[in-house]
Image (tube, rainbow, N blue to C red):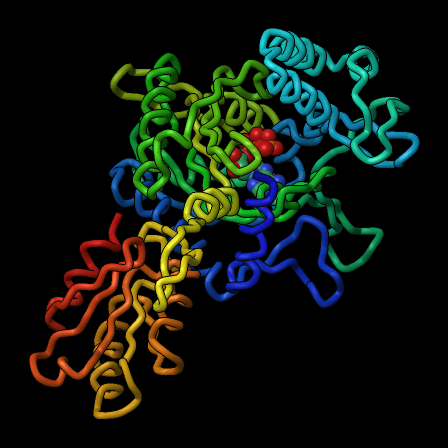
């Protein structure tokens, strides 16, 4: 499966989806750029999320808050005090590891050896010790389990230390006047501090939600697995404000609703699962992840958390500004509880890409076996919806094809090409996941029909030019 993942990473680069950041300077670790096809795919993912949240739910509105926030925000949220990862260094290789990653790796190994019970015990112990911040005992656990550094192979470990994951910078031009500000490590706080602004100006009634898509930054110490864990990434978060006591009802509602969304964008049920958290973050009273089966195993794509009044309560205390809502159904003022859904746009991108990457054994024109690689993307997410090709560069075919292209481009992202043999042109579209290829041939001159080729089956059918718009329209909506 590692081989498959490497192929997907290479494909992403080769076909203009994802490039290492500032590659001419050998890249910047855990930072990536999206190319001409990647940006379309990512925008389509974000649009699918935004539309589902803010258009299909009457009681959810969006905002776009700034990345910089008042430094007190991160005191109230708990990030200054506890947004840390316990880390340990191997003295021989000088490599640094996240303690939980090392122990989870060991647990995976135990599971692979059929020792499920031992793995469970180990994870339970780890969670207890992490919750208790007992670093000495955690180090002992690593040593007792004989966990070796993957690079040096030795068990020569340092003490455990903590690193804050927030990036900081100075605001203001004069150094001594400068104030430390942070690049937000999550988008959620921009929503919390605007809770009353939106509630009042939008005349929102509880329960209601606020959605946001935006960049977040974390100085992840162990950044790996391509765009799975980045230092600069994008989150799509929705905070749903509810009456205290109803939070579990909404938690279950969002759990089911979000799973349906993953299915709707084309991820098969068997590659998705829920994972309930045993170890709860400092702000949550219930939490679960939606996990996808990546080539490197089931991993989190989205988190659903019941955050109680932790954030609004802390902001109220620190800012001395009431964060309350008057609920006239129960005649009460209260600080609302929050259920959030938090999903990474980049991680969703990776999920979609891994799920779409397909290699199929087919036959070439001479009947020889060959592998056809294509991206089985949901048409709603595909960077290009249709490619229009004249079969040959003469006899008036390019003019007709261009007319079709010019008509369709008002509604869809489409592509026109007349160079190379048509088989080659089909292949290029398969590789970037274009669901339809439309070919104009000599028959078109007689009866105004074209062939439309379906990416997944490579089957072609003849349709009227006038029907094209409807055929595409039907497939490209979620
Ligand atoms: P992890 O355990 O993988 O570090 P997390 O539990 O800290 O993630 P949350 O804080 O719940 O993640 O963030 C919500 C979502 O944001 C995650 O489900 C993931 O999709 C995305 N996300 C978080 N950190 C990163 C990152 N460093 N790179 C890319 N996406 C991320």
Q: Quadrant of ligand 1?
A: top right
Residue plotted at (31% across, 53% down): 456
Q: Return the residue found at the far bottom.
A: 395
Q: Is residue 402 left or right of residue 104?
A: left
List x then y, in percent, for residue 426.
35, 68
The quarter of the displayed image where residue 333 is located: top left
The quarter of the displayed image where residue 389 is located: bottom left
In the displayed structure, 385 sits above or below 422; it is above
* Nearer-the-camera pick, 283 or 329: 283
Q: Is residue 205 visible?
A: yes
List x then y, in percent, for residue 124.
63, 10
Image quarter of the N terminus: top right
List x then y, in percent, for residue 17.
51, 59
Q: Is residue 188 visible?
A: no
* Nearer-the-camera pick, 342 or 204: 342
Residue plotted at (60% across, 60% down): 19
In the displayed structure, 129 sits above or below 297; it is above
List x then y, in percent, for residue 396.
21, 91
In the displayed structure, 278 sits above or below 254; it is above
Q: Is residue 257 left or right of residue 233?
A: left
Residue plotted at (57% across, 35% down): 296
């Amino acid at each position: 499966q590692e081989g498959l993942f490497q192929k997907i990473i290479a494909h992403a680069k080769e076909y203009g989806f994802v490039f290492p950041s500032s590659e001419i300077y050998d890249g910047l670790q855990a930072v990536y750029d999206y190319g001409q096809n990647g940006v379309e795919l990512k925008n389509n993912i974000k649009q699918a999320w935004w539309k589902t949240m803010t258009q299909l739910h009457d009681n959810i509105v969006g905002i776009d808050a700034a990345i910089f926030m008042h430094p007190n925000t991160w005191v109230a949220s708990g990030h200054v005090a506890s947004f840390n990862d316990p880390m340990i260094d191997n003295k021989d290789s000088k490599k640094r590891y996240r303690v939980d990653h090392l122990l989870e790796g060991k647990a995976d190994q135990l599971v692979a050896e059929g020792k499920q019970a031992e793995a469970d015990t180990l994870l339970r112990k780890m969670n207890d010790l992490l919750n208790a911040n007992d670093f000495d005992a955690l180090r002992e656990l690593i040593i007792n389990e004989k966990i070796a550094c993957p690079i040096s192979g030795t068990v020569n470990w340092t003490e455990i230390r903590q690193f804050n994951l927030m990036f900081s910078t100075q605001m203001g031009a004069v150094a001594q006047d400068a104030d430390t500000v942070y690049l937000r490590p999550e988008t959620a706080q921009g929503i919390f501090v605007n809770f009353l602004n939106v509630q009042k100006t939008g005349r929102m009634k509880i329960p209601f939600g606020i959605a946001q898509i935006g960049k977040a930054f974390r100085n992840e110490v162990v950044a790996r697995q391509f765009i799975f864990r980045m230092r600069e990434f994008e989150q799509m978060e929705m905070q749903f404000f509810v009456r205290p006591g109803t939070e579990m009802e909404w938690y279950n509602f969002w759990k089911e609703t979000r799973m349906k969304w993953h299915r709707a964008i084309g991820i098969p049920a068997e590659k998705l699962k829920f994972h309930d958290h045993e170890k709860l973050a400092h702000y949550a009273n219930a939490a679960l992840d939606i996990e996808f089966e990546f080539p490197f195993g089931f991993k989190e794509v989205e988190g659903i958390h019941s955050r109680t009044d932790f954030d609004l309560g802390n902001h109220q205390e620190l800012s001395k500004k009431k964060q309350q809502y008057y609920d006239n159904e129960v005649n009460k003022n209260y600080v609302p509880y929050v259920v959030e859904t938090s999903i990474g746009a980049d991680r969703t991108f990776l999920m979609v890409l891994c799920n779409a990457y397909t290699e199929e054994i087919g036959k070439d024109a001479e009947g020889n076996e060959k592998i056809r690689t294509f991206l089985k993307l949901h048409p709603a997410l595909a960077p290009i919806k249709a490619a229009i090709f004249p079969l040959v560069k003469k006899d008036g075919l390019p003019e007709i094809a261009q007319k079709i292209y010019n008509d369709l481009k008002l509604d869809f992202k489409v592509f026109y090409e007349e160079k190379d043999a048509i088989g080659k042109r089909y292949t290029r579209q398969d590789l970037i996941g274009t669901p339809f290829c439309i070919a104009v041939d000599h028959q078109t001159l007689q009866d105004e029909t074209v062939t439309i080729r379906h990416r997944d089956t490579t089957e072609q059918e003849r349709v009227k030019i006038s029907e094209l718009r409807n055929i595409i329209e039907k497939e490209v909506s979620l």
